[in-house]
Amino acid sequence: MIPKKILFIYLIGAAFLWTSSDNAFETPSAPDYAQSKFWAALPDKKDKADLVPENSIKDRQKEAKADVFFIHPTTYTKKRKLWNADLEEIEINERTDFGTIRHQASIFNGAGRVFAPRYRQAHIKAYYTKDKGSAKKALDLAYQDVKAAFEYYLEHYNDGRPIIIAAHSQGTTHSGPLLKAFFDGKPLQKKLIAAYLVGMPVQADQFENIKACETPEETGCFCTWRTYKKGYYPKRWYSKKNNIAVTNPLTWTTTEEFAPKTLNEGAVLAKFKEGFTKNLVSAKVHKGLLWVNKPKFKGSFLIMTKNYHIGDFNLFYLNVRKNAMLRTEKYLSKNEVVQ
């Protein structure tokens, strides 16, 4: 027979675990995309997507004839209170704005008006936890916000403009179902300039009607890559079974031809306003990965990682910017855009 004292402790502990589990899946309030505070970037709002690293380029959103819908990566990375981020958390929003909106979304302000929704992103642990059920719920909830934001954008902002979809990491996780739901084989596919789906593996046949871009000028297609140090294979990598598409952001092809760093027109490092660093890395497509040399800059000797995920966009900032502008120009030259 279990002693009463031990039984009491057991019941209190069980009740605590039950309550903790429930609280862990409390969901923060849903965003209302009619309110600008639930957008990290809007064309008529002063935000970090309006910035440029140096005066050699400019924010062209006011004159743009196209739109960019940017889905930011995970910035909910510190202590997990809930599985999904609370959009009233100032710290998380600032991390989004001063990090990915400034360093990534700003890439596209030369090609179109930038729209970047805040969404109840899943905590970073959703990608690593053994609790797959909770992780799926968290990611599904995050996607529902992205979907709702895109629907609001289409109804209230788009006005028939062509669209670039741009995403990184968790943003790319959500961009897949978004493209399938709204573009793949749908009437809106005709409005797709290109999709930049970066930082997550994207299968070459993930979409039925949207293929990987094969040339720098092609439209209606997608570009994708994940960046690692040359010679490195990440865990769970397998070359024979995967069909992962990879774009070389220096040549904009999918071939395994080596692209020297002289083709790298400008990377942007941690200090955004220091401007571009030219010829920082070379690039080569290799069996589902993008291999680059270790970037060399002041303090780079401290970088021990061989996974350059955080720099997927920024190592090629100016190349991506110019390519988004080129594809937009090519699209506009071939299609009549209603204003």
Image (spheres, grey):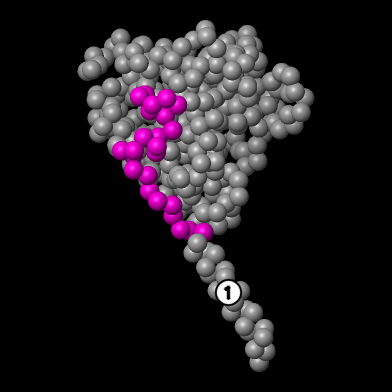
Determine whether, in the image, residue 72 is placed left or right of residue 234: left
In the figure, 175 relative to 84: above or below? Answer: above
Query: Residue 46: image x %, image y %?
Result: 42, 25
In this view, the residue farthest toward the left is: 338
- Displayed quadrant of residue 7: bottom right
Q: Residue at x 39, y 38 (%)?
A: 38
Q: Is residue 202 visible?
A: no
In this view, the residue farthest toward the bottom is: 1
Determine whether, in the image, residue 312 is placed left or right of residue 30: right
Q: Amino acid at mark 1?
A: Ala
**Which residue is at the front of the view, 235 or 322?**
322
> What's drawn in magenta, residue-wise?
24-47
In the figure, 124 relative to 112: above or below? Answer: below
- Displayed quadrant of residue 116: top left
Q: Does the magenta run of residues contain 185?
A: no
Query: Residue 105: image x %, image y %?
Result: 47, 26
Q: Residue at x 24, y 25 (%)?
A: 159
Kind of element beneath mark 1: helix
Q: How would you rate the neighbour count of disc 1 (Cα within 10 Å): few for under 14, some for 14-19, many for 20 or more? A: few
In the figure, 291 relative to 75: above or below? Answer: above
Q: Is residue 262 visible?
A: yes
Query: Residue 42: image x %, image y %?
Result: 38, 28
Give the labeled residue for mark 1.
14
Q: Residue at x 60, y 27 (%)?
A: 311
- Displayed quadrant of residue 210: top left
Magenta span: predominant SS is loop
Query: Where, quadrant-wise, is the N terminus in this rendering?
Result: bottom right
In the figure, 139 relative to 192: above or below? Answer: below
Q: How many marks?
A: 1
**Which residue is at the front of the view, 330 or 167?**
167
Query: Where, quadrant-wise, is the C terminus in this rendering?
Result: top left
Q: Does the magenta run of residues contain 28?
A: yes
